[in-house]
Image: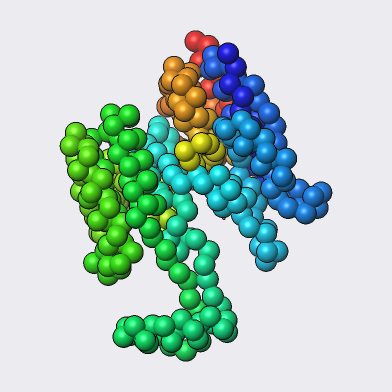
Amino acid sequence: MAHDVALIPGDGIGPEITEAMRRVVDASGAQISWHVAEAGAAQIERCGTPLPPETIELVRELGVAIKGPVTTPVGTGFRSVNVALRHTFDLYACVRPCRSLPGDGSRYRDVDVVIVRENTEDLYAGIEFEPDAPEVERLAELVAASGQKAFRPGSAISVKPISAEGSRRIVTYAFEYARRCGRKKVTAVHKANIMKATDGLFLRVAREVAESYPDIAFEDKIVDACCMGLVQDPGQFDVLVLPNLYGDIVSDLCAGLVGGLGMAPGANIGDELAVFEATHGSAPDIAGKDIANPTAEILSAAMMLDHLGEAEAAARVRAAVTATLAEGTTVTADVRRALTGSTAGAAGTAAFADAIIAFMSK
Ligand code: NAI
């Protein structure tokens, strides 16, 4: 039976890399019925929002979507499509596996770290006050009345809400993921030594949840020490679970350990719905030139195939991507540069996808 999937090509390099992804998935043996839906800058002119209501409805109806990157217009007041999707569907877990690949140009080998980032709370919640907002004065009074150290008048304020419920579901997700995927250890990353209320709550809940998973090792690390540990010896880490902002920063750090954004897949997962997408943006500087690397998008599709119960097809896609990169003859310019120091002889996005498809039919 075919799986119905919403496909959002997006902006910039999105249409090229999603087309490459779609052809690879169609050749993997999985039966997917693709339903194309629009989102992105062009939609603003057409219907006044980058995320049209019919796209939201289609994603809601199908429950699974894969998207290309979407340009976030600067200074227009429009919310990022990704943030809007995460909030609309309560996609609370952002999962980003970072594994070494042949040709990733990294100085590290055998990196295999999975980032599980909380997606809905923290300084990312968007609760902010400009320096001249009347709320800032009221907050200053509240802080003074509570006996805490006053902040400077006219400060800008961002609020960091962290709840027990939000912490519990993301840490539980990380442990369930670890158990399902045969991982050995979960590390909770925080700054509870300084932010005793917010990160302290996250850490307390993480310790409680860990008690229900005696088969998985648990440790906690302060975020700055964790960053140093990641660049010194990434092999010591397995699954990392982090509040939103640290998760955002540490997932790019980890993408850097495995060759950068073009190689890093991702998923945004909620209880009802999942949206898969590469970590990188719409790369307007290389859009429409058939030179973007579709690896991250194709590996995001492999995560989607696992989610759909198509583990064999997912394994076939991963094996073919790895083999094509390892062979190194038909690879995109970024990989070619990492392998040889020059882009001479690089293949285009479509030709790279053809090579992956050829490996699958061997
Ligand atoms: P970017 O990730 O689009 O590009 C950064 C650099 O990496 C550029 O030099 C680009 O050419 C290169 N790059 C990115 N993906 C590549 C790929 N697959 N193959 C080869 N090279 C690649 O980040 P930037 O420039 O900060 O953002 C551009 C737009 O994308 C912005 O409007 C931003 O808001 C949006 N964005 C969207 C995301 C999404 O929809 N998931 C995520 C991040 C940014």
In the rendered image of this protein, does residue 88 appear above or below residue 27? below
Residue at the farthest right position: 46
Q: From where the camera sits, is residue 19 visible?
A: yes
Residue drawn at x 30%, y 67% as measured from the top left: 197
Quadrant of the rendered structure where residue 145 is? Answer: bottom left
Residue 218 point in image, percent of width and height: 21, 44
Residue at the farthest top position: 362
- Between 210 and 235, the one lying in front of the other is 210
Residue at the farthest bottom position: 153
Residue 133 point in image, percent of width and height: 57, 81
Q: From where the camera sits, is residue 253 visible?
A: no
Image position of 309 (left or right of 243): right
Could you tell me how many numbered marks the image carries? Answer: 0
Quadrant of the rendered structure where residue 330 is? Answer: top right
- Between 44 and 229, the one lying in front of the other is 44
In the picture, the quarter occupied by the N terminus is top right
- Between 283 and 162, the one lying in front of the other is 162
- Between 171 and 212, the one lying in front of the other is 212
In the rendered image of this protein, does residue 102 appear above or below residue 356? below
Residue drawn at x 18%, y 37% as measured from the top left: 214
Residue 28 point in image, percent of width and height: 53, 17
Residue drawn at x 19%, y 40% as measured from the top left: 217
Image position of 130 (left or right of 192): right
Colouring method of the image: rainbow
Residue 275 point in image, percent of width and height: 54, 38
Residue drawn at x 62%, y 37% as measured from the top left: 60
